[in-house]
Image: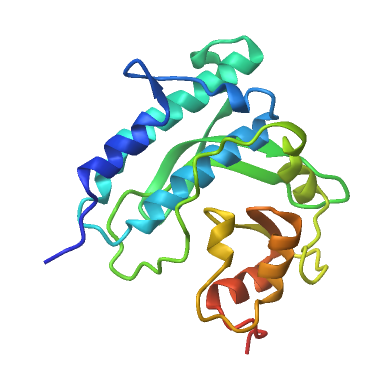
Amino acid sequence: MGLRVPADVVKQRCAKYMQKGKPAHRNELVQNDDFTIIAQYQAEYRGLVQYYLLANNVSWFHQLLWVMQTSLLRTLAKKHRSSVKAMFEKYRATTETPYGVMICLEKVVERENGKKPLIARFGGIPLRRQEKAILTDLDPAFYQRRGHDRNELIKRLLADTCELCGSKKNIEVHHIRKMADLNVKGRREKPLWVKRMAERRRKTLVVCAECHERIHRGDGKPRP
């Protein structure tokens, strides 16, 4: 007995990034800044992969990684009227993992006053089964937003402020798959983070590392 990634899951997710059987650019993202484009692809990829980290055949997502990376590069190439090769060379980077160095795509936004830069990274997730994986991420929905909320996330990140407690330390982003996920059956009192996301109609919440830990722990209490 063991958990396995269904072949249809890989096939269906790859299809979202393809046209006529080939990886394609995404028009709905072309007007976004590069940081936001890369961060969005990573959110979609990470959410699905981390959900299946306990699977014996998690390595099957190598196909999805290639399809999504090619789609990402073609989206960037479309935006800059450039080539896939040029975009790969521009954003090619490496990242350390428990299994060694991995190649990824990375966009760095420098900040003033000695603050750590913001980093959007696609890839860099080892596709190896993790027996002790804690499944905290939800598979985020395929991005289809348009209009006024373009580039909103990077602006909120640059504000460098937790949207729950106001802290300016170790800022991260909490994602949900869809707004309906905020309505959990049996929950008597909605936590502050749920109320805040519902009020703002957002599927992301910029939080400090401590608040992020509380959200995933589910008790809303400070760390001991």
**Render colour scheme:** rainbow
Looking at the image, residue 12 lies above or below residue 201: above
Q: Quadrant of residue 33?
A: top right
Find the residue positioned furthest to the bottom.
224
In the depicted structure, whether residue 189 falls above or below residue 5: below
The residue that appears at 69% across and 61% down in the rendered structure is 197
The location of residue 78, given as percent across then percent down, is: 59, 14
Compared with 213, 86 (above or below) is above
**At 55% from the left edge and 15% from the top edge, which residue is drawn?**
86
**Quarter of the figure with the C terminus:** bottom right
Q: Residue at 28% x, 35% y: name it.
A: 11
The correct choice, above or below, for 137 with respect to 57 in the image is: below
Tell me the residue at 51%/27% (across/down). 72
Count of picture labels: 0
Q: Position of residue 59 (x, y in %)?
A: 26, 46
Q: Quadrant of the N terminus?
A: bottom left
Residue lying at the far left of the rendered structure = 1
Q: Is residue 216 left or right of residue 209?
A: left
Depth check, front residue: 123 or 22: 22
Residue 193 percent coordinates (x, y): 68, 69
Q: Position of residue 198 (x, y in %)?
A: 69, 61
Residue 97 left/right relative to 88: left
In front here: 209 or 218?
218
Residue 170 seen by the camera: no
Residue 110 visible to the viewer: yes
Say left or right for 184 vs 151.
left
